Image (spheres, helix red, strand yellow):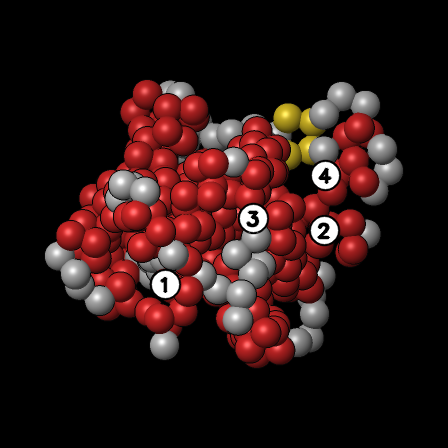
Amino acid sequence: MLIESVLAGAVRGGTSMLYPVLGETIAERSGVINLGTEGCMLAGALAAYVVGIETGSVWLGALAGAAAGAALALVHAFMVLSRGSNQIATGLVITFLGLGTTALFGQSYVGQGVNAFAAVPVPGLSEVPFIGRVLFDHDPLTYLSLVAAVVTWFVVFRTRTGMKLRAAGERPEVLEAFGLSPVRIRYVAVVVGGSLAGLGGGQLSTAFTRNWSENMTVGRGFVAVALVIFAAWNPLKAIGGAYLFSGAIALQLELQARGSEISKYLLQAMPYVTVIVVLAVMSRRQLQRSPESLARVLG
């Protein structure tokens, strides 16, 4: 059934998008935009794949992916927060750094098999017609991503830590008046955001595609940054944004597999066109909700 396959693919493939969208939401809530999310995802994808192969542990691989993404994000944070470099330009440099280093060190791992995450059907629920396959027959990182979205929302909007995070993006001078460092908070936010992007890359290579290839994220990191605007910097709405993009990819793949006469190039462009159209419709209203510090960066 086409609809069932597309929706199941949206959830399965959306996990690698949801993690970086959550990570970028945290970073941008603090007032820092990280266009290097693409590079963090690539670093995480390769690190998870390599460590998974060398250790035989998918969970160690996932941790390595998160650590690799965090390390690259730390470079971005240092350049932006400690050296005062332009956020947009630095983010692009970080992406190219991730692309170059992963292409160099990942050559020997192309085509190697990895000890991948297996699907873990939820007993009982996975057998429910339609809903079971769509929601309850996925790898552990997929279930964990939904938990991460809820936890991120709770931390950002319902805890003292989240209040400090939002203050760093809205009114950093208030934090300073209370003896707190907005720079330190932004450092933590950017690094946490990078670790989630790396985890998303790790899920992509060790659970979704189960392989490594150069530039395998093909722009997902940039789309994740755009989807933060779609989600209005709300972690729960990020779920819909991630699944919208991955659902468009799943539909494209299903149509190709079923021998659709639509040009394959048009089908390949469809997910990105979908994001552009949605942003064109919603961006003016959503940008008004952006953190004030971020609005100054975006002009």
The first of marks 1 and 3 along the sequence is 3
Residue occupied by mark 2 = 7
Please tell me whether mark 1 or mark 3 is closer to you in this view.
1
The first of marks 4 and 3 along the sequence is 4
Residue occupied by mark 1 = 293
Question: Could you give the CA–CA distance between mark 2 and mark 1, rounded to whole angstroms?
Answer: 37 Å
Percent position of residue 79, x then y = 17, 55
User: Badges 2 and 3: C-beta atoms under 8 Å apart?
Assistant: no
| Identity, as a three-letter code, of the amino acid under mark 2 | Leu
In this rendering, the answer to whether 123 lies above or below 47 is above
| Identity, as a three-letter code, of the amino acid under mark 3 | Pro
| Identity, as a three-letter code, of the amino acid under mark 4 | Leu
Please tell me whether mark 2 or mark 1 is closer to you in this view.
1
Q: Which one is in front, 120 or 106?
A: 120
Residue occupied by mark 3 = 235
Residue at screen point 71% across, 61% down: 258
Percent position of residue 112, x then y = 36, 37
Residue occupied by mark 4 = 135
User: Badges 4 and 3: C-beta atoms under 8 Å apart?
Assistant: no
The first of marks 2 and 1 along the sequence is 2
Please tell me whether mark 4 or mark 1 is closer to you in this view.
1
Residues packed near mark 1 inside 10 Å, few (<14), some (14 to 19) or many (20 plus):
many
Please tell me whether mark 4 or mark 3 is closer to you in this view.
3
User: Badges 4 and 1: C-beta atoms under 8 Å apart?
Assistant: no
In this rendering, the answer to whether 85 lies above or below 191 is below
Question: Could you give the CA–CA distance between mark 4 and mark 3, rounded to whole angstroms?
Answer: 19 Å
Question: Could you give the CA–CA distance between mark 1 and mark 3, rounded to whole angstroms?
Answer: 19 Å
Secondary element at tag 1: helix
Percent position of residue 255, x then y = 68, 64
